[in-house]
Amino acid sequence: MLVASAARVDAQIRSEFSELHMGVEVRIVLYARDDAQAREAARAAFDRIAALEEVMSDYRPTSEIRSLDRRPGEWINVSEALFTVLARGMDVARATNGAFDPTVGPLVALWREARRTHRLPSDATLDSARARVGWRRIALDSARRRVRLSRPGMRLDLGGIAKGYAVEQAARLLRERGVGSALVEAGGDITVTGAPPGEAGWRIEVPGADSTIRARAATLTNASISTSGPTAQFVEVGGVRYSHVIDPRTGIGLTSRAQATVSATDGALADALSTALTVLPRAAALSVLARYPGVIASVTREEP
């Protein structure tokens, strides 16, 4: 159900809307000339997010990514949105040497089960899952917009990149609808467009981030910011807390408590990098960031 609040600021109406999508509350704040424009634009933005969820959801058996899992070895034509996200994901996978990996689905399934049963996966099941994970086993054909998974049992999981892409696409649609100042938020992913009336930018609070990120977030415009961390979901076994954030290279849930916040002009990139930076050690993280001029990040890490 669409919920809204409104207040007039500098001849524009500030409106706020929220709906549930992608397993989280999605919030839209925008400034429009009147209530009708605000509601129409917000409705279109939420519909866009819902459509992208049908493409990239790991939970929906009819989603587009699930159709790829069922046809290993075949070249499959995919939507522009899915190809764009996979291409960006593959770029980050290469840059991070697999600390971000869109094929991590078999491992994600194991750790979901571990959180349910409070039992760690056996060595055999971990080995089996790891054998079906590997970003190098995805082939992309940009000329024909096709994708191929090379091995049976592979399973895509875009949980570390899809929300960032979706909120950016929603913000872009709002701009196309004539809304010049908007914020779209889904969990730890935020995209903003132009500054609110009378302000230098959107003020985003990022608890725990360093001064560089806080300074950018205090007057953010036309950019995305994403925060990832392993503290929200975990399983504790034998006195050790294993995060829902998995290192795709080892198959193990993280035991360090890390938070990474990334600001970039690309929402999918910010989301994927924030995921990867919670996995990488400091030196490797700095090396990765050097490949992306204009991207800034803050990483805090607390070892158990």
Image (tube, rainbow, N blue to C red):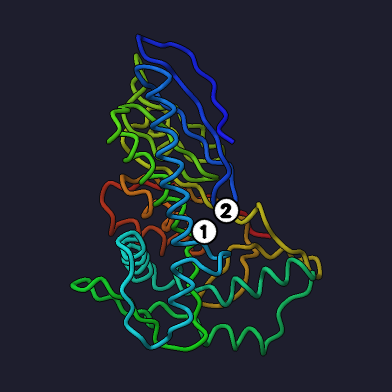
Query: How many circles with numbers are drawn on the protein?
Result: 2
Q: Where does residue 62 sit, x and y in percent of width and height?
A: 51, 68
Q: Mark 1 near mark 2, Cβ–Cβ under 8 Å?
A: yes
> Residue 200 — which label?
none
Judge by depth and name the residue closer to the eye, 117 or 147. Answer: 147
Residue 211 as seen in the image, left or right of residue 80: right
Q: Where does residue 105 sit, x and y in percent of width and height?
A: 54, 73
Q: Secondary structure at mark 1?
A: loop
Q: Where does residue 1 sit, x and y in percent of width and height?
A: 59, 36
Residue 299 as seen in the image, left or right of residue 258: left
Residue on which disc 1 sits? 278
Residue 143 image-quadrant placement: bottom left
Judge by depth and name the residue closer to the eye, 189 or 80. Answer: 80
User: Which residue is at 29% across, 61% downward?
Assistant: 80
User: Which residue is at 74% across, 76% downward?
Assistant: 120
Judge by depth and name the residue closer to the eye, 263 or 3. Answer: 3
Residue on which disc 2 sits? 229
Q: Residue furthest left?
A: 143
Q: Amino acid at mark 2?
A: Gly
Q: Amino acid at mark 1?
A: Thr
Residue 89 as seen in the image, left or right of residue 302: left
Judge by depth and name the residue closer to the eye, 45 or 228. Answer: 45
Quick check: 114 above or below 152? above
Label 2, residues with CA under 10 Å away: few <14, some 14-19, many ≥20 = many
Q: Give the CA separation, mark 1 to mark 2.
A: 7 Å
Quick check: 131 above or below 159? below
Q: Between disc 1 and disc 2, whose residue precedes?
A: 2
Q: Secondary structure at mark 2?
A: loop
